[in-house]
Structures are given as C-alpha cells and as structure tokens.
Image (spheres, helix red, strand yellow):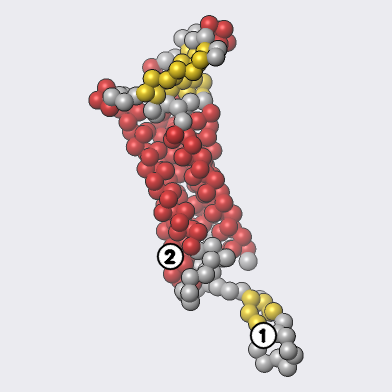
Amino acid sequence: MVATCLHLAGFVCSFIGWIGVVVATATNDWVVTCGYTITTCRKMDELGSKGLWADCVMATGLYHCKPLVDILILPGYVQACRALMIAASVLGLPAIFLLITVLPCIRMGHEPGAAKYRRSQLGGILIILLAMCGVVATIWFPVCAHRETTIMSFGYSLYTGWIGSALCLFGGCIIVCCSGDAQTFGENRFYYASGSSSPTHAKSAHV
C-alpha cells in the first residue's frame, strides 16, 4: 500500500513538473535585462527580457518581441538550451504514457506485475532524463546571459523551469527507487475469500 501511494505521488509530481517544463520552453521571460538598475529601467521603460525564442522589450502598455529566427547568428548557448528543453518536453510524452499504463487503477488484461514494473522503471528513468535536461538548460542559460548583460534578474519562465525540473527529478527518483519490486508491483492486494457459506463474500486483504 505504501509503495502504491509513493508511486502515485511520484506520478503526480512528474506530471506537474513536465507541464512546468513545457511552459518554460514555450515562453520567453527567462531573464529580465537592464542597462541600469531594475528600478531605473522600469521608470525609463527600458526593461527587456530574453528567452529561447525571442528578445522582448517591456514598456508601459507595450510588449514587443523580436523572434530569434536566424539560427546561424544565434549564440551557442541559446541553441543548446533550445535543444535541451525541446528534448525534455518530448521525453515527457512517452514517460507520462508509460506511467499512466502502470497506475493501480489501470488494468491491461492479466498482465503480470513484472511487466508493469519494467514499464514503471523505464518511465521513471525517462522522467529523470527529462529533469536533467531541464536543470542543465535552466542553469546554463542565465549564466551565459549574464556575460552579455551585467544587470539582470530571473523571469517567471526560468522559475517555472526550475520548479518543473525539480518536481520531475523528485518524482522520477520516487518512481525508480520507492515503487516496490518486480514480484509484488501492481499486484491486487484485495481478494474475495472463497469457501464461505454466506451468500456474500467479505473482502479480505493480504498482510
């Protein structure tokens, strides 16, 4: 029962974390840049934001973005972080699908617990790989962006990526390490007692 609860907790953390990684990949508010102090830039309407897909200017009543479409002139760290975040988002699809198929409420015929256990472990490993891609990208990007502009702060996209990657890493580790073993994984812990003389059989539990 404890292993089942841990597996469910790992799945929920992984799913929420994957959504966070996808949101971080799709949005452009990774770092907020400024040539002066943040307060001065707000007053002068000179705040900017950098992301994987566009450089934006934030002013009162105006949010203008310039898409980063010319791959040949893009900095190497932007291209690498793009690849890592796209890989993380794509890895989440098969990982979440595998984890859904091994949930306690899902039954696929008379499948043995060992087969479900293998799928669970594979899904957990994919989630951990997803998290590592997200961690590397969300740390690498602000470090390299800081070399281009000395005054900056973190945007909501970067926080979303950090939280999503951390949840995926936590959930993946729970699934891989705390979901029981191949012999008992996914077994039905409740059965109907046989041989009873009463018309209705009471539900019993394995100890």
* Total numbered badges shown on the rendered structure: 2
Mark 1 Cα shell of 10 Å, populated few (<14), some (14-19), many (≥20): few
Q: For mark 2, give the secondary structure.
A: helix
- Pick out the residue farthest to the left: 72
Task: Indicate which disc residue 118 carries.
Answer: 2
Relative depth, front residue between 118 and 173 = 118
Relative depth, front residue between 93 and 14 = 93
Coordinates of residue 81 in the picture (x, y in percent): 37, 33
Q: For mark 1, give the secondary structure.
A: loop
The span from disc 1 to disc 2 (Cα, nearest Å) is 30 Å
Q: Residue at x 48, y 76 (%)?
A: 110
Q: Residue at x 49, y 45 (%)?
A: 18
For residue 79, which quarter of the picture?
top left
Q: Left or right of 89: which side holds 162?
A: right
For residue 1, which quarter of the picture?
bottom right
Q: Residue at x 59, y 63 (%)?
A: 4
Q: Residue at x 42, y 20 (%)?
A: 65
Mark 2 Cα shell of 10 Å, populated few (<14), some (14-19), many (≥20): some
Q: Amino acid at mark 2?
A: Arg
Q: Is residue 95 above or below residue 67?
A: below
Q: Left or right of 156: which side holds 195?
A: right
Q: Amino acid at mark 1?
A: Ala
Task: Indicate which disc residue 193 carries.
Answer: 1
